Image (cartoon, rainbow, N blue to C red):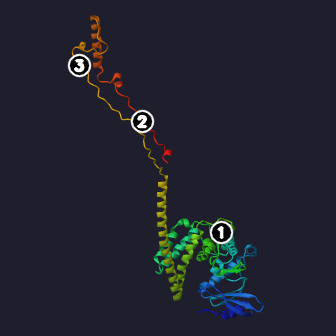
Amino acid sequence: MRRTPLELAAIATAAVPGLAPTATAYSPDDDADFDSALLLDAEGKRWRVRSPRHPEASTRLETEFMVLRAFAPAIRAELPFHVPTIAGTVRQGALTTFVYAHLQGSMLSIEELSASNPALAQEIGVALAAIHDLPLTLVTNADLPSYSANEFRQRKLNELDQAATTGKIPATLLRRWEHALEDVALWRFNTSVVHGDLHEDNLMVQDDTVTALTGWTDLRIGDPADDFAWLVASNEASFVEAVLSHYTQARRETPDAHLLRRAALLAEFALAQYLVKAMAAGHQGMTTEAESMLQTLADDIEEQARRDEAAQAAEDAAAEHQASEVAAAQQPAVSVVAISDAGPSVSVAAIPAVEETDNASDEPSVGSAPSSGGDMERAAGETESESETTEAGTSGTSDQDDTSTAAISVVNVTPLHAADRS
């Protein structure tokens, strides 16, 4: 049964002797776990009351009590924000109610934070860096949970199996989360101290300055992406990028490249955890709300996948068209040049055949007719020699045959160089 602010004020007077509230107001909190109220006393001081609704929530508050005690004055002095101070406690059966000295500042919604002055994004980034740079001994000495990167991933796989047994997680989300959790490269990170329950209700802001961080019930060593999940869930990309930029500058070590991807996964998976928690508590209203949010997320992811597929197809078509245009542009142009007239055509006349006779003296082959008998004999001897020479060279072409044909004109065609084709 939920307690009203007036009931919480009455409990607070038992926890803090001398406290006399004059006004009360509701304080945002994890409604499934805590009843919270703000109190104002006669001196104008403000107080915050947190009362657990079940034993597990009471254990979380007792854990926070140990955490706040571990924040020694030296550690508090190095932080760029204030942490709560417990003013008193009161135990009622198995539950313990805590009263805190209220801190300056007010709570803003995620929409108000993202729309505020850019200086606030820097403040949030520096605050996150300060948490993650806290000494690990702060956690180990308080005997709080500590997980390596692989242990953290395995823990999420176990939680996914538990969520799947409800039968109320859309198949699209189960496949998406399982694929991400099995991607070992995504889970290579250096662990650090993490707040573990960071969201806008635990952030106190005044004049674009982060004045305090509350809700230290889940402090542990684990994945720094845990503290970014609430930011990624805001869907304000520019705001998240600004916070991450200032966070990176303020950290002592460079964050891993997959921090925001894991933060997005953790933000989605938080809905499954909410469903499991609602079903375990037997809260039908919370269960219905969780189912509705999970189905909406699944529909959004499927719609985004269709848009991405269409955009990729259009991009591939554009790239193919551009490649074809580039290939066409790179092919050199060809110029066709007409070859000038080669001149008059050449007529080749047949060479008349030489009549052969048995008597070489009937027609001398060279010179004029001899005038004497000796000359006739010498001419006959020369004729026989020439006849033998002709018979021996019938297979070849003599110089006399070449010179017997008319001259042939040859046209030289110069090849087109690549530069001339353009």
Tell whether 408 sits left or right of 188: left
Residue lying at 70% horizontally and 80% vertically, measured from the top left:
205
- Indicate the position of residue 63 as horizontal and vertical percent values: 65, 80
Residue count near mark 2 (Cα–Cα under 10 Å), binned few <14, some 14–19, many ≥20: few
Q: Secondary structure under badge 2?
A: loop
Residue type marked 2 = Val
Whichever of callouts 1 and 2 sits on the residue coming sooner in the sequence is 1
Q: Which is closer to the viewer, label 3 or label 1?
A: 3
Q: Are marks 3 and 1 in contact (CB under 8 Å)?
A: no
* Residue underneath mark 2: 411
Residue type marked 1 = Ser
- The foreground one among 250 and 314 is 314
- The foreground one among 289 and 30 is 289
Residue count near mark 1 (Cα–Cα under 10 Å), binned few <14, some 14–19, many ≥20: some
Whichever of callouts 3 and 2 sits on the residue coming sooner in the sequence is 3
Q: Mark 3 and mark 2: span between their CA atoms?
A: 40 Å
* Residue underneath mark 1: 245
Q: Mark 1 and mark 2: span between their CA atoms?
A: 76 Å
Residue type marked 3 = Glu
